[in-house]
Amino acid sequence: MLRIDVIQAPISALSGSPGGSENQFEKLDLAIEMLRTTEGP
Amino acid sequence: MGGRVVFALIAAAVLLEAAPCEGRDVVVLRAHLQFSAAPVAKAPRVIFSLPERDERYSLWLEPEFDVTRHLSSLELVLQKAGSDTAATNMLDPPGHWHGYQKYMFAASDFARGPEQSAYGRTRTMSVKRSN
């Protein structure tokens, strides 16, 4: 089975207020590691 | 955020390693995906293959907009290479599903930072679909 680990780096710019519907991304960084695991197919 | 919004997805440091060994996990891909509002015509993708399969796969962030053209969320998409849409995402759970999945990154979920988001700073997801 394949497994993906995603680590979210700090978002440099996000406008809007906590929980508000007006929130929007300007930048998002993700560090991704994909592994072949011994579990499953 | 007014005007035309175009996106950049920068992928770097893709590392393919050896075939899996019995009894331990093996890293098959390391990548860095960055979304920004930079003016790029088409978002680049991370293209990779698995050592034991004669298939190529692509990984990218698909933007989603609300009615006011605000970038409200991004979806991490894993697909066999060659497809141009996010209609089939190998990260979708098998069968019927609903709700906020681990491959979804909603802006409203990050207003208090990654640590306070629904899944925390690190998300682990299993690929259970083959296409």
Image: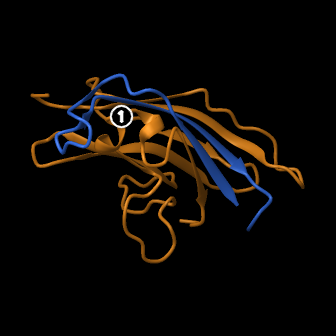
Q: Nearer the viewer, residue B68 or B88?
A: B68
Q: Is residue B88 above or below residue B113?
A: below
Q: Which chain is orange?
A: B
Q: Nearer the viewer, residue B128 or A11?
A: A11
Chain letter of the residue beneath label 1 in the structure image: B
**Which residue: 43% across, 77% down?**
B96
Q: Is residue B96 left or right of residue B72?
A: right
- Say what secondary structure mark 1 lies in: loop
**Which residue: 31% across, 35% down?**
B111
**Which residue: 28% across, 43% down?**
B108
Q: Is residue B19 left or right of residue B28?
A: right
- Could you tell me residue B82's position as x and y percent? 46, 52
- Could you tell me residue B107's position as x and y percent? 30, 40
Number of numbered discs overlaid on the protein picture: 1
- Could you tell me residue B62's position as x and y percent? 35, 46
Query: What residue sits right under mark 1 in the picture?
Result: B112
Residue B54 placement: quadrant: bottom right
Look at the image and tell me in which quarter the N terminus of chain B lies. top left
Q: Is residue A28 above or below residue B55?
A: above
Q: Is residue A12 left or right of residue B89?
A: left
Q: How is the image coloured?
A: by chain
- Could you tell me residue B56's position as x and y percent? 59, 50
**Amino acid type of the residue that numbered disc 1 sits on in the rendered structure:** Arg
Q: Nearer the viewer, residue B83 or B106?
A: B106
Chain A's colour is: blue
Residue A17 placement: quadrant: top left
How many residues crowd mark 1 within 10 Å: few (<14), some (14–19), many (20+)? few
The residue sitting at the right extreme is: B22
**Which residue: 89% across, 54% down?**
B23
The residue sitting at the bottom extreme is: B95
